[in-house]
Amino acid sequence: MTNNKYVLDWIDEMAKMTNPDKIVWIDGSKEQTEALRAEAVATGELFKLNEEKLPNCYLHRTAVNDVARVEDRTFICTPTKEEAGPLNNWMEPSECYEKLSKIYKGSMKGRTMYVIPYSMSIVGSPFAKIGIELTDSIYVVLNMLIMTRAGKTVIDALAPDDNTFIKGLHSKADLDETKRYICHFPQDNTIWSVNSGYGGNVLLGKKCFALRIASYLGRKEGWMAEHMLILGVEYPNGEIKYLTAAFPSACGKTNLAMLIPPQIYREKGYKVWCVGDDIAWLRVGKDGRLWAVNPENGFFGVAPGTNEKSNPNALATTRQDTIFTNVVHNLDDNTVWWEGLNNDPPKNAVDWKGNKWDYRKYDKKDKSTCGAHPNSRFTSMAINCPCVSPKFNDPEGVPISAIVFGGRRAKTAPLVYQSRNWDNGVFVGSIMASETTAAAAGAVGVVRRDPMAMLPFAGYNMGDYFKHWIDMGKKIAKKPLIFNVNWFRTDDEGNFIWPGFGDNLRVLLWILARTEGKVDAVETPIGFVPRPSDINIEGLDITEDTVKELLTVDKAVWREEVPGIRAFYDKIGDTVPEELRDELALLESKLK
Ligand code: OXD
Ligand code: MN
């Protein structure tokens, strides 16, 4: 497929170590993909689902011990520990290569090594970067064919003397969790993943490359790789404005990215277009604006909770060409089901572990009774999404008017606020936090800091990452404005006050109006909040007083927040930029 010597030598070296029976290049052709699907079905790695109801869809089950990303086994392997920073696990590169080489040794014996050339972002785009993943898993190949642009066109685009491609090695080995490692070598453009078969650990184009390695490259090369959705809001006059938004995992990025406007807005002609639901690569354009692409080609979304109300567009996207992982198998009609899909669980079903599942024993409060794993997933093609943006395949990307941060806070953060300027906006992103819910193990209401939603994904020291944000601000002549949203404010009884879902558009419209100077705002110690009358509540079951409550900034609550922020900065240490320390001091003085 190629005469690039760097590629060939590297494959040779990896094959010598892992010792596969054969090596197969993935060309992206329909014929080869079909043959691989058939092979996976024959071995039981995939189940073919009902062709009429779910055309071209498959079900896969991971090992029971292998169902999520493993942050404690994820390492950034830079020559010094300081480069990785105190929030990442670190291993010295040569030590890591040596340790993992022993695990990889002979791990592909009796198996095929697949060579997947893939591009993050569209081939030929100024944003695009090429990776090659070597893997012994057909499941990985078939997922990568959905999640990235992969195959012959990509390897053809790699020049014979180009050695800048990202080298990814994955082996399931024997799925031993005590020897599971997800390791990144940013200086070597290399990713080594072993002993897992779960998407977030093994689809190396996603978190490993498009966030961890790319964030490192972005700093070096003057651009940004962020854990952000990208969406466009179309106005009745046909104009479209784009924004990006970063929320921690499981805070509704996919839902917001595919939002359906409330009826009164649809009737007026508003639409929302999804460019991406998880990752944004951002560059300064020739026009001085910030431009974004989604480097991915598909969605690796969480299935439970996805339904006709929460996200009809995602649901429609999964109705064809999808690989489902760890959901319930409905044996009556050979389809799939998950908790929160509807109130009609299948009566004749197999759970995510492959055991017969009795829906009558399902107890919402006891996760062990779930039919689908809470982190079960769908891998679907973006082009199948009913609201996919017409700009999805535009190599130039889309211009960004606003950057939105957000988290799950019961009391602290108002529904929305605007930062005072770029540096203050970086501060807002750096103090992002979410409160744990009863849905996760551990104490409820504990604040977990997750700056820019990048805590598990920054490929280098978080303090240096903050500095890169500050520096980028100096390069963007026409800066997007930076906001924070909180859909999760609760009343004294703990009920959510804001309706959320499609109605979040009402808040996005205020944000976009601010970017055009079309609406006023009220200054508070943390930034600008809307005048309550500027959040349109027409057709909603809430009053302007409720909006007032949603927008209050309680100084006492924020004063309590400050020591937590300071402690977090202290944990990061000296690399926290002076600009952010100054912002913290300013906030403190404004709260007096
Ligand atoms: C994801 C995550 O899967 O953030 O997107 O964990
Ligand atoms: Mn994510």
Image (tube, rainbow, N blue to C red):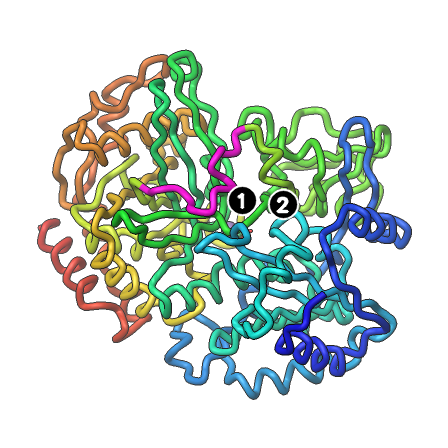
Which secondary structure dominates the residues rendered in magenta? loop
Can residue 177 be spotted in the picture?
no
Three-letter code, disc 1: Ala
Residue displayed at 37% across by 15% down? 541
What x and y, as percent, mark residue 371?
73, 40
- Say if the magenta span includes residue 503: no
Give the quadrant of residue 419. Answer: top left
Q: Is 68 placed left or right of 127 in the picture?
A: right
Q: CA distance from mark 1 to mark 2?
A: 9 Å
> Mark 2 and mark 1 in contact (Cβ < 8 Å)?
yes
Q: Secondary structure at mark 2?
A: loop
- Say if the magenta span includes residue 397: yes
What x and y, as percent, mark residue 119?
57, 57
Give the quadrant of residue 205. Answer: bottom right
Residue displayed at 38% across by 44% down? 245
Residue range of the region highlighted in magenta in the rendering: 387-400
Q: Which residue is mark 1?
A: 439
Q: Is mark 1 within 8 Å of ligand 1?
A: no
Residue displayed at 24% across by 61% down? 470
Q: Which residue is mark 2?
A: 374
Q: Secondary structure at mark 1?
A: loop
Can residue 471 be spotted in the picture?
yes
What x and y, as percent, mark residue 136?
76, 66
